Amino acid sequence: MTRYPPVTFVASHSELGGQESYLLSILRTLPPDAIRGVVALHDGPALPRLAALGHRTWLVPTPARLGILPAAVRLRRVLRAGDAELVHADGGKAALCCALALTGTGVPIVWMKHDTSFDGPLARWIGARCAAIAGVSPTVTATFAHGDVHVVPNGVPAYDIPRDAARRELLALLDAPPEAEVVVQVGRLVPTKGQLDTVAAAARLRRPGLRVALVGAPDRHAHEYAERLRERAAGAGATLLGYRDDATRLMAGADVVVVPSLPRGGVYGGGEGFGLVAAEAMAVGTPVLAYDVPALPDTLGGAGALVPPGDIEAYARTLGELLDDHGRRERMAAAGRARARTFSLDAAVARLQDVYRSASRGRQVRGTARR
């Protein structure tokens, strides 16, 4: 099989979120000799986790807007010093910086596109300067009309989590009785993830036995949102658990996992590009209730329940119906497990390696281009 040069990864962010978590999964799954190093464009809590993998790690602080050009100059120096031959730009900010930094060098860039941020003329300008684009769903690649564009869905491991044990641990964490109904949401505390909608739906249900666990770290751009969420959570039986490495295990102990992502962008990023939390929940056998926004229906593949985004009444009603109907939850769980098996992490990384080969050869790999 044709090889490709060792890859230098450039990470847009260092938050404790899904994008960073998935990058860590890729780095752990690739052969060590396939990785030349990792550059982070932001100093955040994920940076020590990236460094702990044992690869060379650099930090190039990159502010927004006017700070991009000076940072791109610094990034160019770092990539040259690190002998970069092939670059994986993880996210829109990384792709923009790499496109500026590597102009005229001949070093190929693979843009791993996770969401719809930068879509439109800017995305197409960046894409024209990349050797290949690997989008996590057709939703995030739709903005491109030309180029070596591939759909490489996120992958999830084959989890083996005993659900009864996970439930006992989750109940103990929430100080909840055995008969409690538990709903879990996982995601950074930002408006686009819709935690306030979850709290509002739980309050509307008025179920004394309902517990809501909100798992995720506050985002550095959204302190006010996190404070507002804390204020409203207590009255709805919701508990903020912060970031947790065992988030998938907590989902395995829940009755329902909710993914009320909203179709807004701005500073918090573009709309949902895949729905990694939904895929992980399905993989551990927990039913998923999500907002019907682009990408999530494709990820769920009919195995989850969907309601219109922002419709709190429909959200609360459907959540209540799921909690009342054990048989329906069991059927959804079985369908979800089957659906999640189509998102193998090993298969996803193998397809990403095909894209690296494509980028290094300068031509498309048959069978992996955008569908």
Image (cartoon, rainbow, N blue to C red):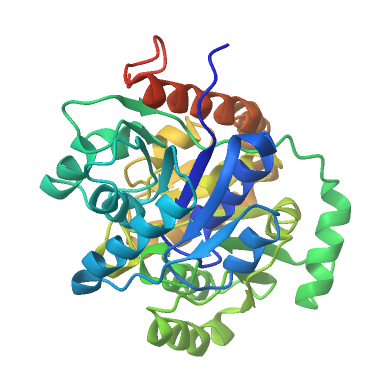
Residue 117 in view (yes/no): no
Q: How many marks?
A: 0
Q: Position of residue 91 (x, y in %)?
A: 38, 51
Q: Is residue 253 above or below residue 6?
A: below
Q: Quadrant of the C terminus?
A: top left
Q: At 71% across and 62% down in the image, what residue appears?
A: 245
Q: Position of residue 278 (x, y in %)?
A: 54, 46
In this rendering, would 146 be left or right of 109? left
Q: Residue 235 or 92: which is nearer the viewer?
A: 92
Q: At 35% across and 19% down in the image, what residue appears?
A: 369
In this rendering, would 121 be left or right of 101? left
Q: At 39% across and 87% down in the image, what residue appears?
A: 224
Q: At 41% across and 66% down in the image, what residue appears?
A: 194
Q: Is residue 287 above or below residue 148?
A: below
Q: Quadrant of the N terminus?
A: top right
Q: Position of residue 288 (x, y in %)?
A: 56, 46
Residue 244 found in image quarter: bottom right
Q: Is residue 289 above or below residue 183?
A: above
In this rendering, would 62 be left or right of 210? left
Q: Residue 70 or 258: which is nearer the viewer?
A: 70
Q: Position of residue 86 (x, y in %)?
A: 43, 37
Residue 171 in view (yes/no): yes
Q: Residue 354 or 225: which is nearer the viewer?
A: 354
